[in-house]
Image (spheres, coloured by chain):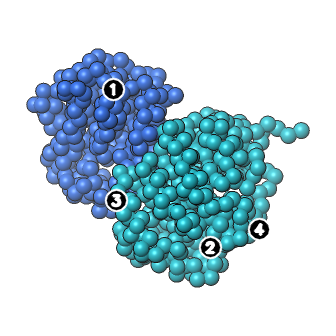
Amino acid sequence: MSASVPASPLVALDTLWLQVAGTLCNLQCTHCFISSSPTNHAHGMMSLDEVRPYLEEAERLGVREYYLTGGEPFLNREILEIIEAALALGPVTVLTNGVLIRPETAARLRALSDASPYSLDLRVPMDGADAATNDPIRGQGTFDRIVAAIGILARAGLNPVVTVTEACEGALSGDGRGRLLAFLRRCGLAQPRLKVMPLLRLGAEATRTRAYAEWESLRGRTLTSEEAEALQCSSGRMVTSKGVYVCPILIDHPGARMGGRLAETLRPFDLDHAACFTCHEQGLSCRT
Amino acid sequence: MPDLKRTAEHGAFRRVAFLGGIYSNYLALSEALRIARARGADAVYALGDFGAFGPHPDRAVEILRDQGVPAIQGNYEESLSTSADDCHCGYTDPRDNRFAQISYDYTRRRTSRDHKAWMGTLPGHIRMSIAGRRLLLCHGSPRKINEFLWESTTPSAFVRRLLGEADADVVVCTHTGLHWSRLDAAGRGVVNVGALGRPANDGRTEVWMTLIEERPGGLAVEHVPVPYDHERLAREMREEELPEEFVETILTGYWTTCLEVLPAKERARGRH
């Protein structure tokens, strides 16, 4: 007989994620927990007209911040208009692999940022401070293209947050961190910002290393209210072309779709997935 | 709903001076109290975080207690009065946390037992009114003592929700160390009063306090720079062997630590 699972209450809807590029990506990273690729249409591209009703509902609900992701958001032809619409309501973070960002795009982003009272952040991932460590995960030639993108953003006066996963050698040690920060300074970032992300044993990553084991579960556990409130599902929701999901991580899991509109999803969620174990044990938040 | 237990109800005022994080800067605190008197404030309130960062933490607390300045707890007072092992400042970056721990360990060691007990008696929130507007005083946000309300990440729709949940017209807060305010035409919104403890990451050595007063039809908010003998403070910080990074901030006006919590716009205004 299986034990019961703890639930995460929705304390407040502070963070709205929008999967504006679905699962479509120009890259195919071997650790992607939603297996985004040039051919993965599991979640579709969202037009500005599809995004707008969610932004309006979010404003009525008093959402604090917006995250735009994919897939690769800059594959979305309306991405700049979507960023502008979200920046009118609050701070925006765009999760991009960076390689499609041209100097003209960076200049437009800078102009959108300057025109808003709210912060615009770009978040660019790497998997090591050289091609030898990065490219086996992100793809041949991607290291040079990511470094070029960081330079383009820096020259436009934008200061991207660089994320590395635990797959990146030394990301968790003080020395490794220092080397990464020094490398980012050489890339042109005067005030380098770095975020380390745990890996999720889902999607492509389940093949690259291993899938979750049975013991990696919150089943039978009780969480204090403080522990439950630390989980990102207590303060956020994820919108894709298919509806509203509990979080950005579980969009491939049918039980994680909570409704068609945000108002239908303002309720507790049973922490029945192995990835919930990672969020709890490692304090994972997809927020910056 | 925010947890508003331990809320003290105060009365109606005409012109009030608000003091944000003092961070042991007793020299700036004395100056701020002098300015408040000179500007005719009919009350002065302190919004928590009396210690941290600066030297001789008991000196600022003694001034507050001697002068009977009404105050609420910040995360520092909550931590010190409950013998917590860290300040619960809410940083996420390892370097920021390392410097925060240096501050907290020094302050905890050098704060008298009597002052710590007094900190435990302070309310978490105070309600008051100015010009008929209902103010809620809190340290971070109405719902959390260490939530950061930065200008560029506190959108107006979110503020309306906070005000509705807190049943208030104006949230008066500190915790970020950067002053800003946004009131709508009806006089509803947020006033972050800034900090007396260290400069505002803008290359100026002054620190900041805030006056809120009635004016025809609503409220006026004025963020007031507080010049003080920052070179003396820097000298005393060095004598106390506090990190040179902290001293640099006092002497240059630019933050050298607590940087990773800054949103993009606020970070871009600084040097580091």
Please tell me whether mark 1 sits on a helix, a strand or a loop. strand
Give the residue displayed 63% in from the left and 78% down from the top: A139
Q: Earlier in the sequence, mark 3 or mark 4?
A: 3
Identified by mark 2, the residue type is Asn
Q: Identify the residue under disc 2.
A: A26
Disc 2: which chain?
A: A
Please tell me whether mark 4 sits on a helix, a strand or a loop. helix
Q: Identify the residue under disc 4.
A: A207
Q: How many marks?
A: 4
**Chain in cyan on the image:** A
Q: Is residue A22 left or right of residue A59?
A: right
* Mark 3 or 4: the one toward you: 3
Crowding near pointer 1: few (<14 within 10 Å), some, many (20+)? many
Q: Identify the residue under disc 3.
A: A114
* Mark 1 or 4: the one toward you: 1
Please tell me whether mark 2 sits on a helix, a strand or a loop. loop
Q: Identify the residue under disc 1.
A: B135
Q: Are marks 1 and 2 on the same chain?
A: no
* Mark 1 or 2: the one toward you: 2
Query: Real-space Cα distance between discs 1 and 2?
Result: 51 Å
Please tell me whether mark 3 sits on a helix, a strand or a loop. helix
Disc 4: which chain?
A: A
Query: Real-space Cα distance between discs 3 and 4?
Result: 43 Å
Q: Is residue B158 above or below residue B133?
A: below
Disc 1: which chain?
A: B
Q: Quadrant of residue A20?
A: bottom right
Q: Are marks 3 and 4 on the same chain?
A: yes
Query: Real-space Cα distance between discs 1 and 4?
Result: 55 Å
